[in-house]
Structure formats: structure tokens, C-alpha cells
């Protein structure tokens, strides 16, 4: 195996030619990609290497997912051993790694759940919508509940239904119309920019009242579930007030609506607890998990359902209560085996506690950047953090797209990858950080130092 950080110009040239001739990439403009292509060749800890041998400190853990860090070769061993034993069989039958993983996940959630395996966060949410609908079809066929209430500026995935459930206009507009009124939206809990123009706590959680009002307006008998990401990532890392999620749960219980929590990013230690909702002591009915479940070493995800939901799928064969969906790779033995070991590593190395500890350290560092007049807010939990950049702290006018992109590009040139929140028009002025949970203090210092220089350079340009 070639060393991860060895420059390899020949390989680079080969990949670039083949790629440009054949690949269609997500999100990036090919014309731009062609000018400065990055060929990633390896990774170790919190660092990735390109074919030039350049090292980058990855402040985003890929796409918010490589929680245990890069270069864990033992996971390759686990996958190889499982593939020699059994590479694949449909999950209508049972296999050991998937059963182990389900048991592990159920245990981490405190018990009382069953796990339905899929391959991506989008599918996990999508299966959640379908399970919620079928739950009501099975349990209360007369009611016909089918609507999902989501929040504006949320991201829940890339399929048509998960886009519809999310609230990012810019991600949807090329595909609209997205269908009927199955997905209804309420205001998001972004306290720094409260959608109601209020301030916490005198707002009395207007955003929660908005949910109740929407359930009543839609007719509770039509609403199947409320979908929330505990700490919203896409909208610039929005941490809600502590009472928000418990109050949302109360409303769900009051109107017999299921609580569906998206833990795709929040889950598996990212926020300093195993799951984001565990900060708020709520008990969701449906939980979507992905990314950190395998730290992206292999694709695997799941929709986890509380036993009250699971029980609605039990009955005689003739009743047709069973889960009416399947995906070919669900419960894939090799992916499940890798996820099991990934979670073991997370627990053995106490990476959840580490995320809390390093998160505090990183946050303290980022708060020192508040001396820049262009830093409006620093927020987050664990190793999920955002730095919102503004032109003016009083008016909170967001910096322009080119200005925040300048910060991202500056950091990259210095060998540090930071993200930019994808919330769209009003919320894309936040730098996002979601590094591997193995990040060191020195690496946190480097992120803070580099961001400080980048923000100063942006400010100098604004003043020029
Ligand atoms: C909160 C959230 N939910 C769902 C998804 C979709 O996951 P995937 O890209 O694996 O389909 C993402 C992806 O980033 C996400 O951030």
C-alpha cells in the first residue's frame, strides 16, 4: 500500500483525466473543478492528503461523518473478514453483524427500540416518513394521518421527499414542484435571527407555539409526525433553547403525533452526547441515523423505531401489517460489521466525552475571535460549531457569499478545511465546523488561528 501522504503526480494526472472525461460530481461546478481539482489519496486522524502530498486538517470530517478519524486500517480488516464469511444476503433473513449492530444501537438509546437498516441519511428519513404513515394506517386506519411537519431551513436529505420535508429553498428550486401538502413547515429555532423578531426567553418559545398552531391548522387527524434535527446543522448550527425539544415532544404527545428526530449529523458523539436528543431528555418515536454510525468507512444508515411503533407492524401475515418496503443493501453484513467495530472504537476511546471536552476547548478558542467586529455569533455543542459572520454586529447584516467563501478559501490555502453552512439565501453566512472526534488541542488551536487570520483578511478587504 502506498503511504497516505506520498506525492504522486502520475496518479494525479491519471485520475484527473479519467474523472473529467467521465464523472458527474455533486454540488460543484465542473468548470471550476477542472481548474483546481483535488485528488484525495489518503487520511490519518483528522488529516487528509491529496495527490500532491499536501496535508489538510479536515475541520468538517468529510461531510460531517468521519467521527473516529481517518486511517483506521483495522476496519478494512473487519470488512475483509466479514466478506470472506458472508458478503451479502437480503435482510429479509437475519445475519450476525446486523443483529449485533441493532442490539448495540438499541443499547446506546437506552433500549426499547428496533432498527430498520438502509444506506444513507436520506433513506433513513424517507423510511421514517413511510413508517410513520404505515403506523397510522395499521393502528388507526380511520384517521388517515400522513403529514410531516418540518422546519424551514432544515436539511433532511437529497431525495424528493426529504427535500420536500426540509426547508432549503435553494436546494429544492430546481426540482419543484415537489408534490402535494404532505410536508408542512414551521419556523425554525434560530435564536440569533429569531424568525418572529423576538428574544429568548421573553419570546415564550413562539417557535414551539407555531408548531401547535400548525398542527391545529392542518387538523391533528391529518398529522403523522413532527421532524426535527435536535441541533440544526444546515442553518448555521442552530442550538435551540433547552426547553425547545421537551416542549415539542409535549405537543406531539398532546395531539397523538409521532416525534421523528434526525440524528444523521448529531448522532454518534458529534454533539458531546451519543445522540443530540439526549441533551434534552426526550424519547423520540422515530430516529434517523447515518454518518457516524460507521464513520463513513462503509455506507450504512438506519431508521430506529420505538417499540410502540414497532408493535403496530406485528400481526398475522394475512393482516399485511409488515413493513412494506425493502432496499437491496439494507443490513449489509460487511457495512454492519464495520459499524459495530466503529462504535466499539468510539466507546473504547471515550470519543463522546472527548467531543464534549474538545468541543469546549474549540468553542473557547473560537470565542476569542469575537474581538473581530465581523464575528456576530459563535455557537454549537460538542464538536458541531458555527461562527456567524456579519458586516455589522448591530444590524446583523450577513456578509456576502463571496466574503464567506473567501474565508473558506483562505483557510484551505493554509491547509485547513472549514465548512460553510448551506442554509441558503439568509443563512449561508456561517462557517461550520464538525471535525473528527479525535481532533487534538493543537489542531483546534490551528483552526482558531487560521480562521482568525482569514476573518481579519476578509475584514481588511471589506474596509478597503
Ligand atoms: C441532518 C441531515 N439529515 C439527512 C442527511 C442526508 O444524509 P445522506 O447524505 O447520507 O443521504 C444529511 C446529509 O448531510 C443531514 O445533514
Image: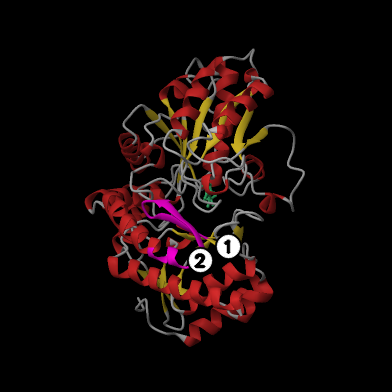
In the shown orientation, is residue 73 left or right of residue 139? left
Q: Per the image, is 377 magenta? A: yes
- Above or below residue 365? Residue 21 is below
Q: Where is residue 195 in the image (x, y as percent from the top left)?
A: 61, 42
Q: At 52% across and 33% down in the image, what residue appears?
A: 205
Residue 71 horizontal/vertical position (percent): 34, 66
Q: Do the residues labelled 1 and 2 touch (CB within 8 Å)?
A: yes
Query: Which one is nearer the viewer's eye here, 310 or 401?
Result: 401
What quarter of the picture does the C terminus occupy? bottom right
Mark 2 lies on a secondary structure that is: loop
> In the image, is residue 93 above or below residue 39?
above
Local SS, label 1: strand
Percent from the top left, x then y, of residue 94? 39, 35
User: In percent of the image, x 52 and y 18: which residue is there?
Assistant: 254
Res 312 visible: yes
Which of the two residues, 147 or 324, is positioned nearer the viewer here?
Answer: 147
Q: What's drawn in magenta, residue-wise? A: 368-388
Residue tagged by mark 1?
392
Q: In the picture, residue 151 is in which quadrant?
A: top right
Where is residue 303? Give x, y as percent: 47, 37
Report whether the residue tagged 2 is closer than 8 Å to ligand 1: no
Residue at image mark 2: 373
Quarter of the rendering occupied by the N terminus? bottom left
Crowding near pointer 2: few (<14 within 10 Å), some, many (20+)?
A: some
Q: Is mark 1 within 8 Å of ligand 1?
A: no
Q: Earlier in the sequence, mark 1 or mark 2?
A: 2
Amino acid at each position: 500500500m502506498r503511504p497516505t501522504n506520498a506525492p504522486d503526480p502520475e496518479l494525479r494526472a491519471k485520475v484527473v483525466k479519467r474523472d473529467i472525461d467521465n464523472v458527474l460530481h455533486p454540488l460543484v461546478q465542473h468548470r471550476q473543478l477542472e481548474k483546481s481539482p483535488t485528488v484525495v489519496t489518503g487520511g490519518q486522524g483528522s488529516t487528509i492528503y491529496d495527490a500532491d502530498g499536501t496535508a489538510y486538517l479536515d475541520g468538517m470530517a468529510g461531510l460531517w461523518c468521519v467521527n473516529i478519524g481517518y486511517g483506521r486500517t483495522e476496519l478494512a480488516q473487519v470488512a475483509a473478514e466479514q466478506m470472506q464469511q458472508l458478503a451479502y444476503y437480503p435482510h429479509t433473513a437475519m445475519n450476525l453483524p446486523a443483529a449485533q449492530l441493532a442490539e448495540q444501537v438499541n443499547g446506546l438509546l437506552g433500549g426499547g427500540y428496533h432498527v430498520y437498516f438502509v444506506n444513507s441519511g436520506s433513506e433513513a428519513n424517507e423510511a421514517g416518513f413511510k413508517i410513520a404513515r404505515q403506523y397510522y394506517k395499521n393502528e388507526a386506519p380511520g384517521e388517515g394521518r400522513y403529514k410531516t411537519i418540518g422546519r424551514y431551513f432544515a436539511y433532511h436529505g437529497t431525495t424528493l421527499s426529504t427535500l420536500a420535508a426540509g426547508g432549503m429553498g435553494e436546494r429544492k428550486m430546481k426540482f419543484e414542484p415537489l408534490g402535494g401538502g404532505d410536508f408542512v413547515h414551521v419556523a425554525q429555532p434560530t435564536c440569533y435571527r429569531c424568525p418572529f423578531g423576538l428574544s429568548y426567553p421573553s419570546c415564550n418559545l413562539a417557535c414551539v407555539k407555531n408548531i401547535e398552531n400548525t398542527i391545529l391548522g392542518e387538523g391533528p387527524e391529518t398529522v403523522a409526525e413532527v421532524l426535527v434535527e435536535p441541533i440544526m446543522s444546515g442553518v448555521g448550527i442552530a442550538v435551540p433553547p433547552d426547553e425547545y425539544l421537551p416542549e415539542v415532544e409535549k405537543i406531539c404527545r398532546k395531539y397523538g403525533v409521532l416525534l421523528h428526530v434526525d440524528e444523521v449529523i448529531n448522532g454518534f458523539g458529534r454533539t458531546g452526547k451519543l445522540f443530540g436528543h439526549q441533551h434534552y431528555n426526550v424519547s423520540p418515536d422515530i430516529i434517523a441515523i447515518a454518518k457516524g454510525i460507521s464513520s463513513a468507512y462503509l455506507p450504512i444508515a438506519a431508521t430506529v423505531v420505538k417499540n410502540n411503533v414497532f408493535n403496530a407492524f406485528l400481526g398475522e401475515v394475512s393482516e399485511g401489517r409488515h413493513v412494506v418496503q425493502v432496499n437491496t443493501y439494507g443490513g449489509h453484513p460487511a457495512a454492519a460489521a464495520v459499524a459495530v467495530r466503529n462504535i466499539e472504537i468510539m466507546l473504547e476511546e471515550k470519543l463522546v466525552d472527548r467531543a464534549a471536552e474538545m468541543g469546549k476547548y474549540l468553542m473557547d478558542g473560537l470565542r476569542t475571535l469575537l474581538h473581530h467586529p465581523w464575528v456576530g455569533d459563535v455557537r454549537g455543542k460538542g464538536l458541531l460549531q458555527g461562527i456567524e459572520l456579519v458586516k455589522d454586529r448591530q444590524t446583523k447584516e450577513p456578509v456576502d457569499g463571496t466574503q464567506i467563501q473567501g474565508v473558506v478559501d483562505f483557510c484551505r490555502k493554509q491547509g485547513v478545511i472549514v465548512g460553510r453552512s448551506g442554509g441558503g439565501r439568509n443563512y449561508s453566512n456561517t462557517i461550520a465546523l464538525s471535525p473528527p472526534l479525535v481532533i487534538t488541542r493543537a489542531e483546534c488551536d490551528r483552526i482558531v488561528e487560521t480562521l482568525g487570520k482569514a476573518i481579519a483578511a476578509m475584514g481588511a478587504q471589506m474596509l478597503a
